[in-house]
Image (spheres, grey):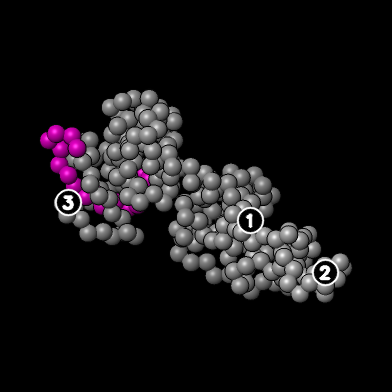
Amino acid sequence: MRPGWTEVAYRYDGSFAGFLSCVYDSYRYHEAPGAFSTPEEDRVSLYPERPVETDAGHARRVFRSLREKISPEAQRLASHSFLTCLPERECAIWRFIEMGYDIGPGVTYWLTDERVAPLLGAVRHLYNEAHLLKGFARFSDVQGALIGEIEPKNRVLPLLRRHFCDRFHNETFLLYDRTHREALLYHAAQWAIRPLDQLDLPPASEQEAAWQALWLRFYDTVALEDRYNPKLRMSNVPKRYWGQMTELRGEGRAPRPAPRGRDVEKRLISPHPNPQK
């Protein structure tokens, strides 16, 4: 902590602009935030608590300073770190920003520093999860719109926006994040990410149910019984994603394909075939 600065606990609205407003106030009033709390994550702190109102002007000023006084890479690392599930992420980002103001552009190269390494690891996890969900997200046709649900650890919607808006540029779609209760909406070349406490969908139509049945049949048909390897599948498709994937719903595992042709003959010869063989 800087000499003469007062340790406080900031209470803000949970937005990135609100966090940047806290950074502005910390330098304006010479305060070192020891804790942050939001309406969704109310915490008890031993530090004196001070509420901070979100000020768009202050937030823009701080955000611009991250690029000008530190570097574009530092600005990106700070903003993307805010999307992660890193514990006490606000304190970690504040310490990184404080270090960046002191050191300058080279701060992002301090890879092993305790103020930099946690953010780099958290952002790497964020990028990996966003990459996986580009392939794991599933959409269903609901009254002419494509609706999908995901349950990520990080707030990945801002990173998924461009991919799905480009992919479904002629469609109307909604991608709902159950974990953080927010949704990416797209219609007529316009997009928005909005809070959404709950998503209640009607039962699947006959046509949608038929498409899902076709997809399951394809999934079972292309599967190779002799290469059935649940451990390998779980490493490629982590189990926590299965609940939102059409082909892996139900009992929390994918159904093994029914044996056909020579597979039947092998089972008749050997009552305990080795599926790993």
* Mark 2 vs 1: CB contact within 8 A: no
User: How far across and how far down the image is residue 249, in percent?
Assistant: 62, 68
CA distance separating discs 3 and 1: 48 Å
3 vs 2, front mark: 2
Question: Which amino acid, mark 1?
Answer: Leu
Residue 3 highlighted magenta (yes or no): yes
Instruction: Write the residue at 21% across / 50% down.
Output: 9
Location of mark 1 (residue): 232
| Residue 81 appears left or right of 251 | left
CA distance separating discs 3 and 2: 70 Å
| Residue 83 appears left or right of 227 | left
Residue 5 highlighted magenta (yes or no): yes
Question: Which amino acid, mark 3?
Answer: Tyr
3 vs 1, front mark: 1
Question: Which amino acid, mark 2?
Answer: Lys
The front one of 268 and 143 is: 268
Image-quadrant location for residue 24: top left
| Residue 245 appears left or right of 125 | right
Location of mark 2 (residue): 266
3 or 1: tag closer to the N-terminus = 3
Q: Which span of residues is magenta-colored?
A: 1-17
Location of mark 3 (residue): 47
Mark 3, secondary structure of its residue: loop
